[in-house]
Amino acid sequence: MRIVRFSDGSSPCYGALDDGSTRIVGLKGDPLFAAVEPSGRVFELDEVRLLSPVIPRSKVVGVAGNYSDQPVPDADRTRPPLFLKANTSVIGPDDPIAIPAWSDDVVFEGELAVVIGRDCRNVPEAAALDVVRGYACFNDVTARELQRVDGQWTRGKGFDGFAPLGPCLLMQREMPAEAVLCTRLNGRVVQEARLGEMIFGVPRIIAHISRFATLRAGDVIATGTPSGVGPVHDGDSVEVEIEGIGV
């Protein structure tokens, strides 16, 4: 099931995308925390505004690099290198990214996002997929020069709007390793990799994070980006597509 959160001009609603991805079957309840049932309403996809499928309850955790074609910071392949993004950086899949006036080096980073389904701590790697609620596409927008100036990544990755998320939440336990992540800049493919090329898989990442921080239901983990990261400018269009999820 692919869950969307959307607005038709009134309060945000939840729905399920039909197989043709053109209609939304309205749902009652919050699919992140409870069972849902049809509301009896049907919406045309092109008549609503898609919102981020979840609002992170406490945090967004990112993994640096993490693909076999990318260098791992400090050449450390024993544990996932992590950083935090503000939860206020999350926006909907079609929302504009506001480039800060003081930044002239903003880049896109297409990624797979994992959404946590329940509060958890010290999760064994073998059981880590049990806490996954679903998956979405993610753009880890970054102001590169602020990373360099600050010497750490909080400000450069934490601006409001620096985390487009969507277009839906694919409700399943695991993503197939052969699924392809593709990023396009103004229609041109700039990143492409199979999810199986990640150095640290989803279970390893969840286990590592949960050893030092409680993961909350609704938290988002951005699992890293393949090579091909590049700059974006005013007026550009960035699309992140993952097989089975959408664009």
Image (cartoon, rainbow, N blue to C red):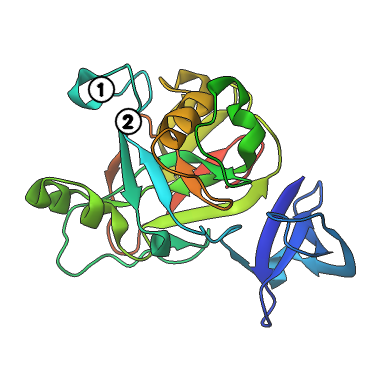
Which residue is situated farthest in the bottom direction here?
Answer: 10
Residue 226, percent from left and from top: 37, 30
Q: Nearer the viewer, residue 104 or 54?
A: 54
Q: Residue at x 21, y 18 (%)?
A: 75
The image quadrant of residue 16 is bottom right
Which residue is under mark 1?
71
Amino acid marked by disc 1: Pro
Asked whether the beta carbons under mark 1 and mark 2 sit within 8 Å of each other, the answer is yes
Which residue is under mark 2?
65
Q: Earlier in the sequence, mark 1 or mark 2?
A: 2
Residue 7, percent from left and from top: 66, 73
Residue 186 appears in the picture as rendered: no
* Left or right of 99 in this view: 27: right
In the image, residue 33 sits, relative to residue 113, either above or below, namely below
Residue 210, percent from left and from top: 46, 36
Please, what secondary structure does the residue beneath circle 2 have? loop
In the image, residue 34 sits, relative to residue 194, either above or below, namely below
Q: Quadrant of the N terminus?
A: top right
Q: Nearer the viewer, residue 32 or 97?
A: 32
Local crowd size for mark 2, using a 10 Å CA cut-off: few (<14), some (14–19), many (≥20)? many
